[in-house]
Each structure stands twice: as structure tokens, then as C-alpha cells.
Amino acid sequence: MIKDLRTFRHLSLSNYYISTAGLLLLPLLLLWLSRFIFAAYNAQLVGDPSFWRVMQLSLGGLRFDLSVWAYTNVLFIAMRFLPVPTVSCRWYIAVTNVIYVATNSLMLWLALADIPFFRFSGSRLRLPALTDMFHDPNMHSIILSYATDYWWAFAGALLVTAVLAGACIWLKPTQPPAKFHSTAATYGVRAAIFLAVGFSTFCAMRGTLVKGRPLSIADAVWYTATPPETNVVLNTPFCVLRSVEGGTRVPEMRFFSDKEAEQIRSSLHTPSFPPDSLLRKNVMVITLESGSQHWIDRLNDIPGCPPHVVMPFLDSLASVSLVNRNVMATGRRSVEGIAAIYGGFPTFGDMLYMSSPYNANTIDSYARLLRDEGFSTRFYFGCNHGSYSIDSFLSAMGYDLIADRQVYADDSEYDGLWGIYDDAMGAYAAKDLTTLREPFVAGWFTLHLHEPFSVPARISLDSFKHREPSPLRSAEYTDMALRRFFETARLQPWYSNTIFIITGDHGSRDFKDTPYDGAFIQPHVMFMIYTPDGSIPAGEISGRMMNQFDIGPTILGLLRYGKPYVATGTDVINSSDPNYAIGFFNGQYQITGTRYLITMTPDLGRIERVFDVTADPLLNQPLTTYDTSETDRMMKWARAFMQDYTLRLNQNRLHFQR
């Protein structure tokens, strides 16, 4: 009897259609199971769901799995089920196996890779972000650098490929497809099976049997109770696939008449300064990679969190600067922060300006406006040319020269991964600025407060509190690089006539499971304005919430720029209009004031939760009662902001039409 059972099993698995079905089910099962690893690894970011809650969400996610699985396997399915004699040939089966392993490996690699990457982006990976990464000519080195920390993801990628290849051997069909005594019957049945499988595959790809649009990323919300759970329902290959065509275009939002929206808040700025009052002072904006506010002890006011004491120079600079403790990043990635700071361009979700349909739009960036007034422009960015399209974005924003690794032209200071070491690039920038015609607008983006947290071998670590690779050691090194930059800059003729602004591209992402990783605290970035001549007195901007994209209008206000311009941000020094911070995190809008933080649905249709950020900065408990007049004001502001922004973006009106 045992022998008969073995024979039956062998005959079943060796049947052409059964073995093909087995092969097809395997990657679908692996993709579905990867969601559980994703949810466990990123539990805090997706709402800490229980196992049974993940199971519920995974059942909803099966539609999304089926869709991308069908797209991935459509060629394999078509070749295997073609009603032709060739399908049972050994060479033909070998070719289809290669296609099967290659396409499904790629699908599963994407799913595995985004498990650790999700904590950097805060949303499932989309195609624009993926292609932007691979535009970096040094990406292979960056990927390899993560092999130690995320070895399990690399091992998992190799394992799934091995499993898929092994399945091709184990489920090798030895019996031909359906065969009958009549040739007509044989090919009639095969054709019927081909059509049935083809129709089923088409339905799976669309994700629906009804008319209308196919399954989209937005449909995940129907299976969730809270927006962060959408990331559990979705899978990364599906998100990449659905963002291939048209996925980066931002839909227009309308909540008010144009006049009503403008009365609530407006992106059209008509400064009160006389047109001839422009100050001819230099501007230097320094953006720290992972420049969290909380690295600066003077600005770190998180309950129960002792000072880091790793940036003494910036602490001392903050004491003689105008600072704001209420500055929020718009996202969790460098490209989002750079777009907001230097272009005044907010980013909500995965639409990246340089890889979007809007990359030819005209933007009233402060560098471009000031260049038109005779200012020189230059930007210092020690990465490779083309890295993350940051240099092309800055060029579009009005910077005439991007001093990158190739312009620096001395690889003795190359870290082997990201770019030129920060202290070397800072010294280069301080001296190179002397060659520019004044006044100038300049920027510098540091690199090394980032994994793998390397410092130059020539640097003595004797004075460092933290000598092993860590975010804390890199914070000490970044502080040292800034100190050396200012030591060199003080000796330059342009120094005393310069406004220095120091901020961060995004909050630190390296304090998982600590208060610093909370939804309110993590996006906070440092912000200080320092003038060596004391023309801007030291102090604190109190009671004013600020976005990264408010920096541009604030700079123009400091320089008394008097011409009309368009900017989504606000001059927080010279304006008394209500202002809030807005960002898009974990599938929901987050609007933050100095009193409340509210989360809103992706369509801004309703408020989901309200937190008191003064009494509860860790957002432990949403409020059940609150001042509805203030939350209504915040909601109206957010709607007016998004209406103005999305209409201007789609109509190419993010500039003043002179």
C-alpha cells in the first residue's frame, strides 16, 4: 500500500498541469508569508498589530499578492499553457524554468529588501524611489555595506532563489499535457485550458472581476482600521508595479473655492519690503544628514532623555543663534528633505520631483530668485555625480555648480561608500567660497551621520566619547567637521557678511524603540540662524511651528526680498499668520501645531486622532475631548494647503508669472 501511495504521489506531481500549478503556488505562498516577517520587524511603524490582526490584514493582502504574482508569472504561464506540442520538450521546460526562477526571485527579493528598508522610508517602496537609488553609480558598494547588519535579508534572497530552483527539479513534469485519442479533442481541451488559465490570470492581474479601474495601492485602505496598517496589507512588488506608469502624478484636491482657500492661507507672497531694500548678504545653508533636533542638547527637551553630549560645537553655536525648536521634516528620506529645504518643494508619499512628471516645472526657489538678483550660487555635496538625482535637482533649483566627489577630485578623502569625508568637504567649501563673487547663496549637505557611521582613519578618536561605529560616534565626527569648517571660514573675507542656517534633512532613524523614534519627536530637525556680525540677535522663535519648506521664504524675509513670488512655505519671522507643519507618514497626513498633533485620512476627509503634544509628546494616548475650534482650524489649513499645492503643481504655477 505504501508503494502504491508513493506511486500515486509521483504520478500526481509529475502531471504537467499539477506540477506547473505547484510551481506557481510556491512564490505566491512565499510572498504572502513575507508579510508576517515585515509586520514583526516593523511592528512599531505599522501599529504593533497582533499575530491574528496580521493574519486578518494578510487575508486582505492576498488580492494584492495575486495581482503582482500574476504580472510576474504571465510569461511563464503563457509559455507553459500554450496548446502546442513543444511545451513538453525538455529544452522548452528548461527555458520556462529559467524564466520562472528569474522573475519570481526578483519579486521576492523586492519583498525581502523592503523589510529593513521600510524604517528608512516609512512607506512601501515605489518605483521612483527604487530607480533613484540605482541611479547612484556607487550603489553596489552601498548594498554590500549593509550585508553585515542585514545579513538575514541577503541570506533570505539566496534561500528563496534556491527553493525556487529546487522546486523546478522536484516538480519536473514527466507526463505530457492533456492527451486524447483524437487530435482535435487533445488540442481542443488544451486550448480551453489555455483560455481558462489566461482569463483567470487576467482577472488576478486586475485584482477584480468587475468593470472599472484595476486594483490600486489606495484600495488597501478598505482592509484596515488605521492608515499604518495599509503597509501590512500591501506588498512591495505590487507598489513598485503600480507606480510604473502615472503613479507619481499627484491628484488635484479641492475643498474650497479659490477665494476661500486663499483667505485661509496663500502661496502667493507679496512682501512689504521696498523692491530696492534687498540686503546684499551671503547665505550659507548647511544641512546635516540625519540632523535631528535632539542631537543639540540645548534644543533637546524630551522628558526622561538625558543629553547626548556629542555635539558641543553646535551646542555652543546654538547659544549665539536664533533657534526654533518646532521645525518638522516633511519625510524620512534625504531626497525629501533636500527638495523641501532648497526648493521649497514638499513631498507627500513617494513622488520625487526629479523623477516625476513635474521635473520641468518652474519653481520659485530662493536660490533661483536671488541668482536673478546677481547672487552667485554653489552647492557642496560630496557624493558621486548623479547620486539620488540630488545634484540635478539642485541645478534645477538655481545652483550653478554642484561641487561633488568628481569636482573635489581627490579620492584620498573618499570613504569608499557615500562620498568625500565631511571634514574634508567642509574645509574645501570654506576655501572655495572665497573664489565666488559676493553676495552668494551656497549650500552644503553632510553625509556621515549615516550607516555605516565611518570616520577617516587619520582622525584620532582619543577625544571621542564613543569610539566604536555608531550614530553617537558619527554625531561627534559631524560636530568636529562643522567646527573645522567654521574655523576655516572665520579666516575668509566673506565670513562676517554671511547668514548661516543649520538644519537637518530628516530626523534620526537610528533610535528604534526609543522615545526619539516617536511620530512627533522623530521628524524634528535642528534649525538655527547664526550671523557672525550679530545682525540677527540670538534668541528663540517661540510659538511658531515650522516646516522645512518654510526655510526658503524665511531666508527671503531675512534678506528683505521685496518682489512677489510663490512658495508653499511661510516666512516665520515676518508673518503672524497661523502656521502648522504637515507631513505624510505611514499612509496618513500628520498636521502638527504647538498644541496638537492630528492625523488625517489620505483624502483629508476626516480627523482620525488628536494628541496633546505638550502634555503627551510621546503620543501615548489620543485625546477623547479637545478644543475642536483649534483642530478645525488645523484641518481647514491642511485642506487649503493641499488644494493650493496640488493645483499649482499640476498647472505649473509654483512660480510668480511676471
Image (cartoon, rainbow, N blue to C red):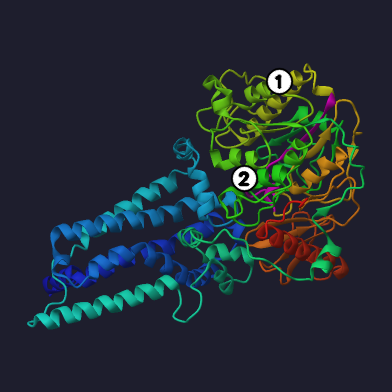
Residue 64 point in image, percent of width and height: 47, 68
The image quarter containing residue 305 is: top right
CB contact under 8 Å: marks 1 and 2: no
Count of picture labels: 2
Residue plotted at (50% across, 39% down): 136
Other-residue count near label 1 (Cα within 10 Å), few / some / many at <14 / 14–19 / ≥20:
few
Pointer 1: what residue?
435
Q: Is residue 311 above or below residue 548?
A: above
The image quarter containing residue 281 is: top right
Front: mark 1 or 2: 1
Q: Gap in Å between the C-alphas at discs 1 and 2?
A: 28 Å
Q: Nearer the viewer, residue 307 or 634?
A: 634
Q: Helix, strand, or loop for circle 2?
A: helix
For the record, the magenta segment spans 497-518
Residue type beneath disc 2: Val
Other-residue count near label 2 (Cα within 10 Å), few / some / many at <14 / 14–19 / ≥20:
many
Pointer 2: what residue?
335
Residue 104 point in image, percent of width and height: 35, 58
Residue 152 point in image, percent of width and height: 43, 47
515 inside magenta stretch: yes
Residue plotted at (69% across, 61% down): 646
Horizontal relation, residue 561 to residue 19: left or right: right
Q: Nearer the viewer, residue 367 or 463?
A: 367
Horizontal relation, residue 411 to residue 566: left or right: left
Residue 602 got which mark? none
Residue type beneath disc 1: Thr
Q: Helix, strand, or loop for circle 1?
A: helix
Q: Earlier in the sequence, mark 1 or mark 2?
A: 2
